[in-house]
């Protein structure tokens, strides 16, 4: 049955801690040095780590609460901080590259991080933090301050509400770190090619006779060459997590600041079809090296800060109330986006565009609710009621050089960086208000779990006097007819995007179009085989779009239809061999045009294996990343070839004078292949990153 986390109940904490220790001892022989180091990281109020420690056995599903993977009525994965450490991860992208449902739509190490989940686009601003939107950084999410990355695939407005930028791809939820039962004082030193160096301090301790007050601090400073050749990047992150565990109440506060800087360049994104004014070469040329610097002499900076406070109160043993409030602010200046170029000649001759940008955004969010468990006869219920509000403001200005200079994609020139623009005002405002209810009922000795619920969402755009509402239902079921090791699941869920007030150039000018409703049907099976957990699912998603009809009316007659099959797996194949990965097949079509959706490869595979070698405390591993063919443009005139790459890693734990040290080394794109990784926007493709090394040492004091 779906469970409600009770982080503040000491008995539950001690029980989970004991279970976690048992799971850790099963995952690795007790004689290995890294067990003592990594065992400190088992957080008691989260679902336990799965065998292999790269994924968790459960995740938080928004309004449905913390749920085991086998009992979740949708396809979900939860990736761990241990996985991030193994690959010396710096950002969310380094973790999500292990998920076959995800493909990134911005260059590696770009100042912005956008990606595609189940064939639908999502950006950093639409990431959730501890279940709430509006807190995460707006451009790139640093991984160092988070414990888990939970990925809920597919539209699900009931579970988490509408995100600031209205993505309906699913929910990526970041779980912040907390102080643990044992004190933590870890120092991680990382070095990456070509000359990027970073220091990360992770400090945590609980205080008081009963250790009720906890403090966790993470600080990061990194600087050096990263991204394009001769491009310098700087990262600064500071994150503080406080929590208090009372007998009947729990409180937490998360505060962070994140700064990203780039100096002297960026990789580019290339169009081969061009525009009416600047025709492209018309064929897809061989890609340049992934670190080709198209924009020397430029600079950019993104500053983010955020805060999230949460309080939980136990009215009785079975009923709890909660309140969460928070917000974030972001400001970016310089070369943030617009790294585009049109290739006009077979020799790589290119017309370049460059933008000097100033953008600001502000988000405020709050949620209050009640959670209860009760029985009606033989039926057990887990009921949650919530009310939420999210306000988002954003404004962007830029000084543009629109394809104003000639360069070459293989041998670029240094462009003239346009003058800095003057930011004026917020030009986009969205106010989202919602009421939601969800009831999970268990029948037949908990062999049948039925979830029904819905969210009434109101969308307001004060700058255009737009105000519309929509009730979005959800129905889902999990059936376990053959015991706990196998479960069948199915769901109907919806995603919601704002409509708009029709502009003056259309025949129906001034009409307020209703919010766009994306609908998903999904069926699947979850299977536990030994120490492996599998999820198989089949789904169909229909997403409407606005198009202009023959009478010049703007109407919601367009539709993107996605049909997919997915398999994901995590755990241990044998005592010494761990497996993490999956395979995704998606067929995405624009029903109104008959064309395939550009930038949605039909096949993706991510298969990772780790081997605990006979050498004590030495683990080696790797992963295969495969992405199939995809159209580069909406007209389906150019197709990006399939590509694959192999990444390798190794980890070794030892002690120096009684101080535990864990060394990690990884190399991405071992063969240093040149390839087009995929699309950023209609017609613009991106080169994949070159061979990249990273090494790190984690010293535990």
Image (cartoon, helix red, strand yellow):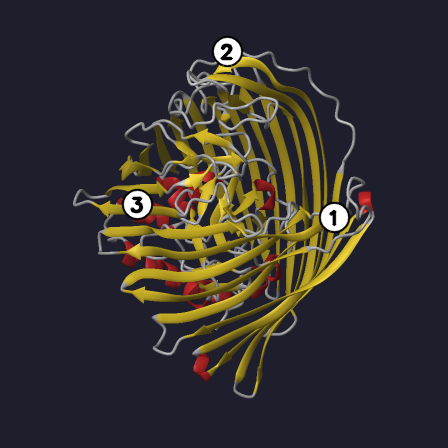
Identity of the residue drawn at 27% across and 45% down: 33
Secondary structure at numbered mark 2: loop
Where in the figure is residue 262, as x and y percent of width and height? 54, 22
Residue 504 location, quadrant: top right
Comparing 424 with 555, the one in front is 555
What is the spatial separation of the Cα atoms under label 1 and label 2, in whole angstroms?
45 Å
Image quarter where the C terminus lies is top left
Q: Earlier in the sequence, mark 3 or mark 1?
A: 3
Identity of the residue drawn at 28% across and 56% down: 572
Comparing 377 with 657, the one in front is 377
- Foreground label between 3 and 1: 1
268 horizontally vs 676: left or right: right
Secondary structure at numbered mark 3: helix
Residue that badge 1 annotates: 553
Identity of the residue drawn at 47% across and 36% down: 637
Q: In the figure, 222 relative to 635: above or below?
A: above
Where in the figure is residue 416, as x and y percent of width and height? 60, 11
């Amino acid at each position: 049955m779906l469970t409600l986390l009770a982080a503040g109940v000491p008995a539950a904490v001690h029980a989970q801690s004991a279970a976690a220790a048992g799971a850790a001892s099963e995952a690795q022989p007790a004689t290995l040095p890294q067990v003592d180091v990594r065992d400190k990281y088992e957080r008691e109020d989260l679902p336990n780590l799965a065998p292999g420690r790269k994924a968790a056995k459960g995740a938080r599903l928004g309004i449905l609460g913390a749920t085991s993977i086998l009992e979740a009525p949708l396809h979900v994965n939860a990736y761990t901080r241990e996985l991030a450490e193994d690959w010396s991860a710096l950002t969310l992208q380094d973790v999500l590259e292990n998920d076959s449902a995800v493909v990134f739509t911005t260059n590696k190490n770009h100042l912005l991080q956008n990606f595609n989940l189940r064939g639908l686009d999502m950006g950093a601003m639409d990431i959730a933090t501890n279940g709430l939107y509006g807190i995460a950084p707006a451009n790139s999410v640093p991984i160092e301050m988070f414990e888990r990355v939970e990925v809920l695939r597919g539209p699900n407005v009931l579970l988490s509400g509408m995100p600031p930028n209205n993505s309906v791809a699913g929910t990526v939820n970041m779980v912040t770190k907390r102080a643990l039962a044992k004190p933590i004082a870890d120092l991680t030193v990382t070095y990456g090619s070509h000359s990027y160096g970073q220091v990360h301090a992770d400090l945590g301790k609980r205080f008081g006779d009963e250790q009720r007050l906890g403090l966790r601090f993470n600080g990061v400073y990194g600087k050096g060459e990263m991204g394009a050749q001769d491009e310098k990047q700087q990262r600064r992150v500071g994150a503080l997590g406080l929590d208090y565990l009372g007998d009947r109440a729990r409180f937490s506060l998360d505060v962070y600041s994140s700064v990203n800087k780039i100096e002297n360049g960026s990789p580019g994104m290339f169009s081969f079809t061009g525009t009416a004014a600047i025709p492209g070469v018309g064929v897809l040329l061989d890609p340049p090296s992934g670190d080709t610097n198209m924009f020397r002499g430029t600079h950019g900076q993104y500053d983010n800060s955020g805060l999230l406070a949460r309080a939980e109160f136990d009215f009785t043993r079975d009923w709890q109330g909660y309140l969460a409030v928070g917000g974030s602010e972001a400001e970016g200046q310089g070369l943030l986006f617009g790294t585009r170029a049109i290739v006009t000649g077979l020799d790589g001759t290119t017309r370049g565009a460059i933008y000097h940008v100033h953008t600001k955004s502000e988000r405020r969010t709050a949620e209050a609710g009640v959670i209860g468990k009760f029985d009606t006869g033989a039926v057990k219920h887990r009921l949650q009621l919530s009310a939420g509000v999210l306000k988002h403001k954003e404004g962007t200005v830029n000084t543009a050089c629109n394809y104003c200079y000639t360069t070459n994609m293989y041998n670029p020139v240094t462009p003239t960086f346009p003058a800095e623009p003057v930011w004026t005002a917020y030009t986009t405002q969205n106010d989202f208000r919602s009421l939601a209810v969800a009831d999970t009922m268990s029948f037949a000795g908990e062999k049948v779990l039925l979830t029904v619920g819905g969210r009434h969402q109101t969308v307001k755009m004060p700058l255009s006097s737009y105000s519309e509402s929509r009730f979005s239902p959800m129905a889902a079921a999990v059936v376990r007819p053959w015991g706990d090791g196998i479960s069948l699941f199915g769901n109907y869920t919806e995603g919601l995007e704002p409509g708009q007030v029709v502009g003056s150039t259309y025949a129906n000018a001034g009409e307020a179009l209703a919010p766009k409703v994306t609908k998903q049907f999904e069926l699947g099976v979850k299977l536990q085989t030994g120490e492996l957990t599998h999820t198989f699912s089949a789904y169909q998603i229909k997403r409407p779009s606005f198009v202009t009809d023959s009478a010049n009316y703007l109407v919601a007659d367009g539709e993107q239809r996605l049909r997919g099959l997915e398999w994901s797996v995590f755990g241990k194949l044998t005592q010494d061999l761990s497996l993490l990965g999956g395979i995704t097949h998606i067929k995405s079509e624009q029903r109104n045009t008959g064309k395939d959706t550009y930038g949605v490869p039909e096949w993706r595979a991510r298969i990772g294996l780790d081997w605990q070698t006979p050498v004590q405390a030495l683990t080696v591993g790797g992963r295969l990343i495969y992405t199939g063919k995809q159209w580069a443009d909406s007209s389906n005139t150019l197709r990006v070839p399939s590509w694959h790459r192999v990444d390798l890693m190794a980890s070794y734990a030892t002690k120096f004078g009684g101080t535990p040290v864990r060394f990690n080394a990884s190399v991405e794109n071992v063969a240093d292949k040149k390839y087009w990784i995929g699309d950023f926007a209609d017609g613009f493709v991106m080169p994949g990153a070159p061979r990249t090394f990273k090494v790190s040492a984690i010293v535990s004091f």
